[in-house]
Image: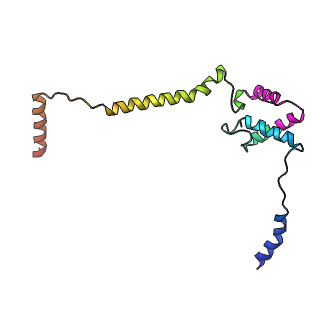
Amino acid sequence: MRWIALTLLLMPGLVWAGEAQPLADDPVAEARLKQLALELRCLVCQNQTLADSNAPLAEDLRREVREMIGKNMSDQEIIDFLVQRYGDFVLYRPPWKTTTTLLWIGPFLLLGVGAVALLVALRRRTQKPFDLPVTDEERRLVEQLLSKGRTGS
């Protein structure tokens, strides 16, 4: 009975809970932050965007981007600043450069190498081993070894 009374007392607090407020007072700035966060990589997680990551460094970078937006920096200026500071790795889709060529071509190279290895393995598997001729002396030796095995000596 006490649990029911306690639940009824706590329920109005649950009902009055409001929606989470945006971190910035300006919804336009918050929308810019979300758009930029989708283009930037979390430096800790490496496979998540800045928007998806909950890592402390990602939170710091989002706060820093929010401050740059507050200073009226353009999106390109913010991206250029972060690339200068952290390198092309901070971009979720790095540009095509000589230093990032392996990032763009690497998956296709690995796929090609895997396909060639699979074809070679399948061809080797289908080839039948050829029969070597057995000489009379080898046949006699085999029969001799087999007969010794049967007699137990």
> What residue is at 78 percent from the left and 42 percent from the top?
59
| Residue 114 % position (x, y) | 47, 31
Q: How is the image coloured?
A: rainbow
Which quadrant of the structure image shows residue 83? top right
> What residue is at 10 percent from the left and 37 percent from the top?
143
| Residue 56 % position (x, y) | 76, 42
Q: Is residue 134 above or below residue 4?
A: above
| Residue 99 % position (x, y) | 65, 21
**The C terminus lies in which quarter of the figure?**
top left
> What residue is at 84 percent from the left and 65 percent from the top?
13
Q: Is residue 132 left or right of residue 17?
A: left
**The N terminus lies in which quarter of the figure?**
bottom right
> What residue is at 71 percent from the left and 31 percent from the top?
91
The residue lying toward the viewer, choosing from 68 and 60, is 68
- Taking the magenta stretch, the answer to whether it contains residue 27 is no
Q: Is residue 113 left or right of residue 83?
A: left
| Residue 115 % position (x, y) | 46, 30
Magenta region, main secondary structure: helix
The residue lying toward the viewer, choosing from 15 and 1, is 15
- Taking the magenta stretch, the answer to whether it contains residue 81 is yes
Which quadrant of the structure image shows residue 35? top right
Q: Is residue 66 above or below residue 21?
A: above
Name the residue at the bottom extreme. 1
Which quadrant of the structure image shows residue 139? top left
The residue lying toward the viewer, choosing from 27 and 5, is 27
Stretch of the chain drawn in magenta: 64-87
Q: Is residue 138 above or below residue 153?
A: above
